[in-house]
Amino acid sequence: MRHWRALAFIGAMLLSSLASARADNSAVIDRWYAALLVACRTEFSELLADDVRMKLDDIGVVQTKQEFIASIDEWQRAVAGAAIRHRIEKSENDSTTVLACYDFPENDMLMRETFTVVGGRIAASTQTAVAQDCSGY
C-alpha cells in the first residue's frame, strides 16, 4: 500500500511540474506578443535565447537573435497602430503552438506560430501564414 501512495505522490508532483512549465510557457508567449506590439528591443533581448532560430516559413528566412533584433526598426513602423490577438492552440513539453491575428491598420493576417521555450526563453520559433485575414480566428 505504501508503494502506491509513493507512486501517486510522485505522479502528482510530475503533473504539477508539467502544469507549471506550461504556465511559464504561456507567460513567455504573452510577453512575446506584448513586446511585438511595442517593438521592445530590451524585452526581446531577455526573451530570446542567444542561439535562437526564428524561422519565417512563408518567405524562407531563418533569423538569429541579432538579425531579429536588428530588424526591429522596420517592424516598429509596420506595427504602428496595429493590434495582435493570440490564443494557444496546444502546448506539449517545451513546444507551444499559437494562432495569432495581426490586425494592421490596412489589412490583417492570421498566423500559426510555434515556439520552443527552454528555461523561460524562446529557443526556436516558426511562423506560417494561415490566411490573409483573421476571419478564422
Image: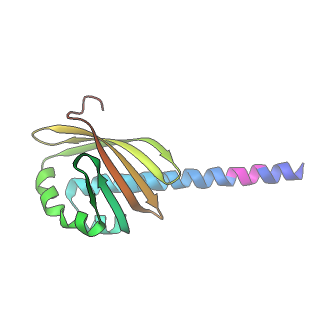
The answer to which quarter of the image holds residue 110 is top left
Magenta stretch: dominant secondary structure: helix
Residue 99 placed where, x, y %?
Answer: 34, 40
Residue 61 located left or right of residue 4: left
- On whether residue 11 falls in the magenta region, the answer is yes
Q: Residue at x 36, y 64 (%)?
A: 52
Residue 35 placed where, x, y %?
Answer: 27, 58
- Look at the picture and state if 12 lies above or below 118: above
Q: Residue at x 16, y 56 (%)?
A: 75
Which of 42/136 is in front? 136
Residue 127 visible in the displayed image: yes
Q: Residue furthest right?
A: 1
The boundaries of the magenta stretch are 8-12
Residue 61 placed where, x, y %?
Answer: 25, 55
Q: Residue at x 31, y 54 (%)?
A: 55
- On whether residue 108 falls in the magenta region, the answer is no
Residue 49 visible in the displayed image: no
The answer to which quarter of the image holds residue 116 is bottom left
Which of 126/82 is in front? 126
Residue 78 located left or right of residue 135: left
Residue 50 placed where, x, y %?
Answer: 36, 71
Q: Quadrant of the C terminus?
A: top left
Q: Residue at x 45, y 54 (%)?
A: 25
Colour convention: rainbow
